[in-house]
Image (spheres, coloured by chain):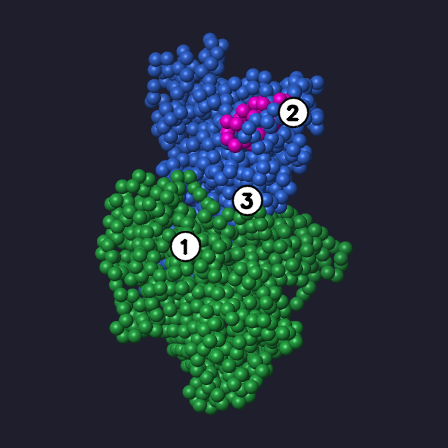
Chain colours: A green, B blue
Amino acid sequence: MAELSVIGQRVPRVDAWEKVTGQAKYAADYSLPDMLWCKLLRSPYPHARILNIDTSKAKKLPGVRGIVTGKDFGGWSWGWMPATRDETPLAVDKVRYMAEAVAGVAAVDEDTAEQAAGLIKVEYEELPGVFDPEEAMKDGAPKVHDYVKNNISVEYHWNFGDVDKAFAESHIVREDRFRTARATHGYLEPPAILAYYDPTGYITVWASKQSPYFHYRHLAACFKVPLSRVRVIQPFIGGGFGGTKNDSLAGDFCAVLLSKMTGRPVKYIESMEEELATSRRRHSVIVYSKMGVTKDGLLKAIQHRVVADGGGYTAIGPLSMYLNGFMTTLPYKLPHFKFDAYRVFTNNPIGAAMRGHGVTHTRFAAEIQMEMLAEELGIDPVEMRMRNAIDNPKPGEIYETINKVTLKTCGLKQAIKEAVEDPLWRDRDKLPKKEGAISWGTGISGSSYSGGARQMGHQACAAIIRLCEDGTVNLITGATDCGQGSDTVLCMIAAEELGIKLDDVAIKRVDTAYTPVDPGSYGSRVTILAGQATQKAAREVKKQLLETAAANWQVKPEDIEIRLGEVFVKSDPEKKMPFIRLARIACYSGTGAVIMGTGYSSYGIEHLDLTNGIGNGGCSYSFTAHTARVGVDMETGQITTTDFTIASDCGRLLSPVQAEGQIEGGAIQGLGQALYEDFIMDRGKTLNPTFLDYKMPHALDVPNIKLIDIVTDDPFGPFGAKETSEGSIVSAPPAVVSAIHDATGIWFKELPVTPEKVVKALKEKK
Amino acid sequence: MAELSVIGQRVPRVDAWEKVTGQAKYAADYSLPDMLWCKLLRSPYPHARILNIDTSKAKKLPGVRGIVTGKDFGGWSWGWMPATRDETPLAVDKVRYMAEAVAGVAAVDEDTAEQAAGLIKVEYEELPGVFDPEEAMKDGAPKVHDYVKNNISVEYHWNFGDVDKAFAESHIVREDRFRTARATHGYLEPPAILAYYDPTGYITVWASKQSPYFHYRHLAACFKVPLSRVRVIQPFIGGGFGGTKNDSLAGDFCAVLLSKMTGRPVKYIESMEEELATSRRRHSVIVYSKMGVTKDGLLKAIQHRVVADGGGYTAIGPLSMYLNGFMTTLPYKLPHFKFDAYRVFTNNPIGAAMRGHGVTHTRFAAEIQMEMLAEELGIDPVEMRMRNAIDNPKPGEIYETINKVTLKTCGLKQAIKEAVEDPLWRDRDKLPKKEGAISWGTGISGSSYSGGARQMGHQACAAIIRLCEDGTVNLITGATDCGQGSDTVLCMIAAEELGIKLDDVAIKRVDTAYTPVDPGSYGSRVTILAGQATQKAAREVKKQLLETAAANWQVKPEDIEIRLGEVFVKSDPEKKMPFIRLARIACYSGTGAVIMGTGYSSYGIEHLDLTNGIGNGGCSYSFTAHTARVGVDMETGQITTTDFTIASDCGRLLSPVQAEGQIEGGAIQGLGQALYEDFIMDRGKTLNPTFLDYKMPHALDVPNIKLIDIVTDDPFGPFGAKETSEGSIVSAPPAVVSAIHDATGIWFKELPVTPEKVVKALKEKK
């Protein structure tokens, strides 16, 4: 790789100043003159037929300007695939989860809107509910939707190789049942929207969306408006992580429809309690894992039967279930793999995507089960992993899994090697194992995650770079920075490619009236794919500039280099000029020129069979080795995590400060899901819908984190980048649970490992 | 030309609904939270030295948040050329015209800002002023600027052919002095700006600008901010016509600086009285015209000496003077031409651009003088024009004037022919010549105007077309619709070229963070040049779609046609699909594609020597023949204009409804300048700075207008378009003055021809 000037530098984010000074404006900060406020009425039942809605009293309340109910949306429904469009903006005939929205009110202020919502009288016929996915699959269970049998929302059945034969040939076969928790995304910004349906038929919204073009499609479809007339203007986004902001909400649709009805702008802000009680959350997944190994600990086969609590609607469930399966063949060599997945409707809130989407469940199961097998075989867990780890393909070579996932780089072995050379692991036996009631343990895990996720449909990213005659540029893209810092990375890519300084690149946020269509911010795709588009757009601008410079100096374009704002002839350094001068020459040449470049991402044309789990679900794959040290209070069950060492092969870190933040953030979020985070449910009701009761790691819970960067220059990603934010959320729970086992001798198979569970298990063990 | 489906249709404007319902938002309609209001303090003298500014009392007024004076801008000045940067945001050492701004205040509300401005104490030393340009040129006249001699702001001296010899050989030579008025643009929306200089160093303004990228450059230069961080967001614009909205204003700069100082958004709205008293206006020009003709009435030579009242600063004056001259060789064959132009500084408000820029003065002089010569020679004025009119070049041929202006089409002869076949002219002798005190007359004129003006610097337009997967498109361009309807025309061009319906094209206004750089809306350039860019962008999208369709049907792309949303194989009409389906196939092909097209305008590489008046100042030229009937009350001098017939060669009218509106609007504005409009000045003070006292034509003053469309498909413009809005403002005054002569026997040489002037002249004649 050529010498880099901007990429790899430790620079502040391009939006740092706005965020640090509180100047950054989020959706809830936007207002328009004559604006109305929207509030929703929600169901008090998890499963009930709606018999009648009487809005007459609410309508009479002074200040009320409009009321909508489910029927006002004319039967429109949405979902991830045509066959799964089972969700309506508001419940129509029945409600399927607790606090599902049934009506929306627009009034002159928030209090009036709330009061009016309370005056709407809904007559319900309560129906028996079903809250456990395994119960829901049984014949005779209450039906959440009529359109499927046994409440099965999504199912996949894959069979690669011959697992039965492989298990028969295995030295040991284990079968265990694992379960992951109902985690929430935990962003601090609640969903919000300011909507204006103008009389010319344009819908304009300022909406908190991590994938604004999903929302744009939903609004166009719901309101039968051309896509070109749906304008989603993106404010700053206070975190997404794949949750509600990756989809559309009752409040979004109601705000737009109420704006259409009233001719006035309408604002909706979801309260954090509404958000936590009702919004999309990570599926709680039961994983029945069967694993067979040889005497030497080599993996022979994995069979997974997963049952996910889908809640009331399908949402992005088909993708979740796919992701539960397709990466099980990574990061270890696996010759036989069988996967039976069931996403099951229940009367719980909807299960959907979250950072580490799908893989967190099955990788947790597989890592812990592999450790158990290593223990049974008496093989060191590091050695067990090294024996099974996929090797780094030689340059130009490709490793292919049994389900045709292909790798061009794999730094797992190197990551394990470097992680265990770190004192945290290397010197673990020198550290005390016991201090008073505290028992100490060290654990390890491995993981992999795909970068540049592929979904159905309109998948490419594009970028436009507009050269200003002062040598600075505007980067225009539909890609979304929902807090992860991708705007900074894209600006760095543009600056590096053009040979200018980072400060010379300006970027503003998505506005679908101007920015190219983009899939959005999910599946660790922005740096890789919007980055690729940005790189190509910059190359197109650079090409035009090099031609101008070449004509000016009478040399060939390829003889000229541009670096950090200086243009020069490589072989004749006397011939040089500042970039700004070259920009001027180019812009003012002839009768004046507009210099722009456009770039488009490309996946190539590889076949992906999502239904059968065959092919690449991403462009490239990260690999992580993760060690953890925990202290378990053997009396109270309290667990303290003191250290993480995370060795990550994320290709190349383009913006190390942010990539490290992502790796650390993912690991901390994973720690939360290992030890603290879960929605406590009682017959469909979320009992802890506040950040006081839903426990996430606080600053004091965060361990010392040491990061080790394993560089594999991936040939697909721009400047070698792979994903950076999802590997460590996958690796953290098994590393922590492995360490808890080391401390307690107990294998925990259900997340989170709370003090109650620890105390109970310790008692049972005695 | 192929059959057209959208172009040439009589369709409503794309912004009709917003404007008709009052929903369209103009700059003054925008607000931001915590916004301050800005007011300016203006000079009570037309020429004075500023000795001291004491802001202490104003600063103490509760609610005042910031005050700026000229020195706060650090000496920055701007102008049309580097050598003419003689204007500062606020006056620094001296004021050069009455009510020039000297200080700006930001306060919590408008009243407080106004009150505070009144509390600023400025100590002036009044200086002798000069208010007449011919006086100002004399030695010893008060000097407005020290950097020039004799107050000459701009001068040009061109000499094509040999006028002296030509005059010597002429049968008759006339010399006359003409003078045009100080007209204002008369838009109803006052200039306004909402400015926010954010802490990250971006300047964002919602500003009423017809050329937003001029303003963007001014702000970047003044505040030393990269162009890429200046965001001019364009609201709807309530008329421009080349006035203040084509430049930057004291209020603009003050709002931005005050926002920078206070960290808060600042709004400035200029009052209509401030606007009319101080803003840029059409130059009042004295034209000394010498014209020689043969016995047969053939033009031998024209010599023009023009003296323009430039007011206090240069502004766009160099271009104004160039435009006074270069089109004098149109629309009649002219073998010899001499031009001496003087733009002169005075202590009047600044002279600048206005619709019909430059040409209105000299064409008025030349048309009337030609009529006088026809009268002397006893030649019919129509015959006189037909003998001299430039012929329509044959296809592929070019007519070149003596100053190397080239025409590929010229419909003047056809226009004259059709205008005089119209009953208004043909039957003029059948109509009463006298009715009571009213004497009736009919007049005629010819004119030409350039379309697609060229200026210095960054001249190209660009367009991006983004295809949505529902077959609709977003058109993204930096071009400005300041009220003329160009957004509709650009959308029509995109629709026609793509083969879709006008409703399927969406356009939003300029936002310099997203839209390509564009010169702006002046010189009748938008339809021609932004239209060309739009056409090319659409072709690029269409090319991609045709390739997709061709692959789908296994035919060649050129065998496929798209028309009004239907795609079909020309030779096999069974093979067809709706455009939306083709869009879907293209967008979802492979792993998904972003379909965009970019297009750039191009002038070719013709040399333009502005200083010497050589070459094309535009891309193509319109031609107009204009007849008028007026009734003159021989007692009161009151003139009633009853009819206009205007035969215009505007190439092809792309959107006839709007083109006709432009032709009519120009003619009515020209009527105002012929009969009513003038700023009455008293030693630098504008005595009629309100629309009550500054008289423009009212609805009842507007004659019946008949338009005749002369189609010459211009090879340069998209679909044959040339300019449509400036020819008729040039042709109206001479047509009206010719008719007044027919009614009264008097030749009026100074505009406007007010009742007072008529009565005086009639008395003198007796």
Distance between the Cα atoms at labels 1 and 2?
57 Å
Question: Which of labels 2 and 3 is toward the front?
Answer: 2
Q: Nearer the viewer, residue B389 or A202?
A: A202
Q: Mark 2 falls on what kind of element?
A: strand
Looking at the image, which residue is at 38% across and 44% down? A110
Distance between the Cα atoms at labels 1 and 3?
38 Å
Disc 2 chain ID: B
For the magenta stretch, what is the residue range? B96-122
Location of residue B525 in the rendering, given as x and y in whole percent from the top left corner: 51, 41
Asked if marks 1 and 3 touch (Cβ < 8 Å), the reply is no
- In the drawing, does residue B128 fall left or right of residue A266? right
Q: What amino acid type should be assigned to the residue bearing mark 2? A: Ile
Report which residue position mark 3 lands on.
B231
- Whether discs 1 and 2 lie on one chain: the answer is no
Looking at the image, which residue is at 42% across and 47% down? A194
Residue B569 image label? none
Report which residue position mark 2 lands on.
B53
Question: Which of labels 1 and 3 is toward the front?
Answer: 1
Locate residue A432: give its quadrant: bottom right
Distance between the Cα atoms at labels 2 and 3?
32 Å
Residue A273 image label? 1
Location of residue B583 in the rendering, given as x and y in whole percent from the top left corner: 40, 60
Q: Nearer the viewer, residue A549 or A760?
A: A760
Q: Mark 3 falls on what kind of element?
A: strand
- In the drawing, does residue A491 fall left or right of residue A86? right
Whether residue B272 is visible here, answered yes or no, is yes
Location of residue A329 in the rendering, given as x and y in whole percent from the top left corner: 49, 78
Query: The N terminus of chain A appears in which quarter of the rendering?
Result: bottom right
Q: What amino acid type should be assigned to the residue bearing mark 3? A: Arg
Q: Mark 1 falls on what kind of element?
A: helix
Q: What amino acid type should be assigned to the residue bearing mark 1? A: Glu
